[in-house]
Amino acid sequence: MTLPAHTRKVAALLMEMARTQGKPTPRGVAVQLDVTRQDVASLLGLSRIEATLAVNALKLAGALAFEGSTLLLNPGVLQRFAEGEAQEAR
């Protein structure tokens, strides 16, 4: 099964955020979250629903976790999603 384009786009954006704004921690790369899902959707040309579905799929796969206003990212899992190699949880 091919990953939806919106999931690949969100994963790629989060990888870029991890690279440019992230701080490595023992639990993942921490990024201070100052954008909404609507902001992500607008930036990537997606609907808010597509952005939400993508975030939820990445969360279920262990690519990201929320801790208050901080986002913990797993770059290895995000990379697989961005390249379309991961399988979404059902």
Image (spheres, helix red, strand yellow):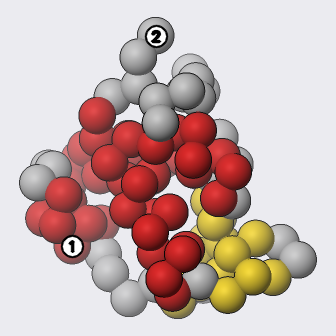
Q: Quadrant of the C terminus?
A: top right
Position of residue 81 measured from the top left corner of the image (x, y, whole percent): 52, 39
User: Which residue is tagged 1?
Assistant: 39
Quadrant location of residue 38? Answer: bottom left
CA gap, disc 1 to disc 2? 28 Å
Question: Which mark is first along the chain, 2 or 1?
Answer: 2
Q: Is residue 44 left or right of residue 36?
A: left
State the SS at label 2. loop
Is residue 55 depicted above or below 17 in this figure?
above
Q: Amino acid at mark 1?
A: Asp
Q: What's the mark number on residue 1?
A: 2
Position of residue 8 measured from the top left corner of the image (x, y, whole percent): 38, 41
Q: Nearer the viewer, residue 30 or 76?
A: 76
Q: Nearer the viewer, mark 1 or mark 2?
A: 2
Q: Is residue 60 visible?
A: no
Q: Is residue 30 visible?
A: yes
State the SS at label 1. helix
